[in-house]
Image (spheres, rainbow, N blue to C red):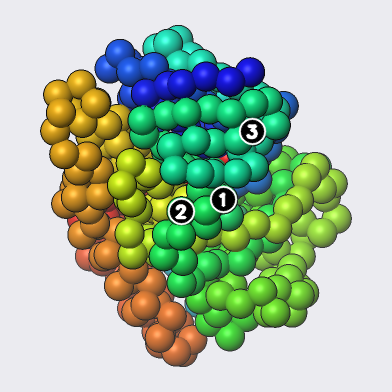
Amino acid sequence: MSGFFDVTIVGGSAIGGASAAECARRGLSTVILEEDPVVGKFRRCTSICSESGLRSTGIPFSEATLNYINGAVIHSQNEDLTLKLREKKAIVFDRQVFDERSVSRAVSAGAELRLGSRVTSFRANNLSTSEGSIGAKVIVGADGVASSTAAAYQFPVIKRFVYCYEAEISNADVAHKDLVEVFFDNRMLPGFFGWIVPVDEKTARVGFGVDDPSKMMRAKNDFFSRKEVSPYKSGDTVRDFHASIPARPRASTQKGNVILVGDAAGQTKSTTGGGLVFGSLCAKEAGASIAGHLSDGKELDYEKRWRSKYGLTLSLHRNLRRLADRMDDSLIDAALSLNRNPLSLSLLSRFGDMDFLFRF
Ligand SMILES: Cc1cc2nc3c(=O)[nH]c(=O)nc-3n(C[C@H](O)[C@H](O)[C@H](O)COP(=O)(O)OP(=O)(O)OC[C@H]3O[C@@H](n4cnc5c(N)ncnc54)[C@H](O)[C@@H]3O)c2cc1C
């Protein structure tokens, strides 16, 4: 099946769906090309976001919601700090359902979805797929961290990644159903952190990330030996996976009429690795910019738009990550024990929006 469209989106997951919805609802002929026979990331994601962040994506998430979180237990090598927020702040959800809602929202807005359609070659405004060739006025690469679109159009490479492992474990005794547990230990987990995210009383997503793939094996042994994590070894592993997260955006995400959105662009938070909220917000900017260009003859100003709206926040996340990476483990211990006073706890519990760091 061939064709010519205003906009061709490479990748039918959360951000491809969000980009397509923004284009289609503005009346642009839009096609999503997804290589797999079904949409989505097959749950290779922890899938926790702040409720306000999820709302800002515009993607319906109520049917995907699995659990509500209202705080965290933060562990360092030798200390821990429990932080309870006044309200439920974050939602744990089913990523597959979320991705499907994102893409079906685009289809309802008029986008065409082609499954099993892997883009194999990119030449100017023409894409070859297993199903035929597609022409487009604008090409949107929403094809994830290993973006073929970015490689084909020679976008600058992403310079830093976080390498992760996660298992969803059931039949476990989850210590806190409404608190996430996070583990900061720069010796064990250099460049990132570990997590236990509860799905319900018996199920949790347990994982970690490091800054170098050669450190994975040792990190996995050490992390699963921690006293808070080792009980999960006797649960049942429902699924597990290795995956990487871009730790910073590409130096450029627009070349002529080709743009990159989501993980393909590196639009993730360096602090937590979350990419769904900012990817979706940048998809909105993509839709507005493409429509302005194709319908009103304006400059395609996607790169300018998303950087001016979200560049500063993402760079604050990067600076916080750099700071955390440089912290000695004894300093992290000290920081946690110092924060265990009523004033900082109440301040911290107001400081609770995980996506927009400085919004109370
Ligand atoms: C361990 C881990 C935990 C995470 N936890 C969270 C979290 O809790 N919260 C959060 O916000 N983010 C989280 N993230 C990040 C989040 O998963 C990503 O930011 C998000 O998946 C980005 O979505 P995307 O649509 O850009 O890319 P993807 O979801 O990777 O989708 C890319 C799509 O493109 C398709 N594709 C690729 N190449 C082609 C091609 N040539 N032709 C056609 N189709 C193609 C793929 O099949 C796929 O469907 C996590 C990531 C990891 C690794």
Name the front one of labels 2 and 1: 2
Disc 2 secondary structure class? loop
Identify the mark at residue 153; answer none if there is no mark. Answer: 2
- Which amino acid lies under the numbered mark 1 shown in the image of this protein? Ser
- Which amino acid lies under the numbered mark 3 shown in the image of this protein? Thr
Q: Residue at x 33, y 59 (%)?
A: 252
Reading the chain from its start, which is encountered first: label 3 or label 2?
A: 3
Compared to residue 43, the image places residue 97 above or below, namely: above
Name the front one of labels 3 and 1: 3
Q: Is residue 2 left or right of residue 249?
A: right
Ligand 1 within 8 A of label 1's CB? yes
Q: List the residue tagged with mark 3.
A: 129
Query: Quadrant of the rendered structure where residue 200 is?
Result: top right
Q: Name the spot of residue 21 as percent of width and height, x first.
A: 39, 22
Q: Quadrant of the N terminus?
A: top right
Q: List the residue tagged with mark 1.
A: 148
Q: Residue at x 60, y 60 (%)?
A: 244
